[in-house]
Amino acid sequence: MIVFQLQDEEYAVPVNQIGSIERQQPITRVPQTLPYVKGVINLRGVVIPIIDLRLRFGMKETAFDANKRIIIAQINEMEVGLIVDAANDVIDIPQESIEPAPEVIGTVNADYIEGVAKVDNRLLILLDLLKVLSSQEIDELNVVEG
């Protein structure tokens, strides 16, 4: 699992859904998109829509800093960049340390959450990337991607 941070919480997503982790780079704004769609980047010749996960989860937007990263993820056969506060590490999570998701965790809708894992002294929220964006939102991103 890839572990990343938003606000004071740590989240994890399966490494097989992640293409790469990139440093912050210039984002080209795209007019008339959803508020959490920051625009697009050109990554090695591929145009990738960029989503600010803080905004997607209803958190307060923060200024860019040296720790911010863009996680390039595969969501429904489409590459999408996810802006996160920091990408912390890659870890193995034993299946027995994963518990079902509680109804609500902080500001993140429980629909996005696959479960919660206790690893050492850390509590990791396991995200289901396929549910972070609805099929309608994916369609809109396909238009942005061109």
Image: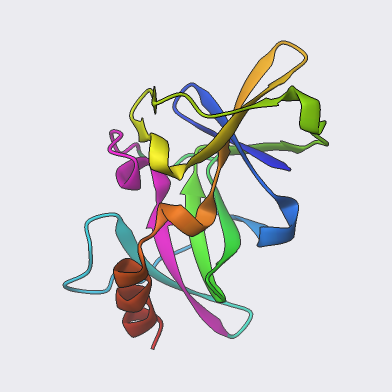
Q: Which residue is more in the foreground, 72 or 75?
A: 75
- Relative side of 4 to 111, left or right: right
Residue reaching furthest to the bottom: 146
* Residue 67 to residue 77: above or below: above
Residue 113: where, in percent of width, then height? Answer: 49, 38
Q: Quadrant of residue 26?
A: bottom left
Q: Quadrant of residue 117?
A: top right
- Relative side of 101 to 120, left or right: left
60 within the magenta span:
yes
131 within the magenta span:
no
Residue 118: where, in percent of width, then height? Answer: 69, 19
Q: Residue at x 27, y 38 (%)?
A: 58
- Relative side of 103 to 93, left or right: left
Q: Residue at x 16, y 72 (%)?
A: 32
Q: Which residues are magenta?
A: 46-62
Q: Quadrant of residue 91?
A: top right
* Residue 77 to residue 119: above or below: below
Q: Which residue is more in the foreground, 7 or 15?
A: 15
Q: Which residue is more in the foreground, 82 or 138?
A: 138
Residue 29: where, in percent of width, then height? Answer: 29, 69
Is residue 88 among the parts visible in the rendering? yes
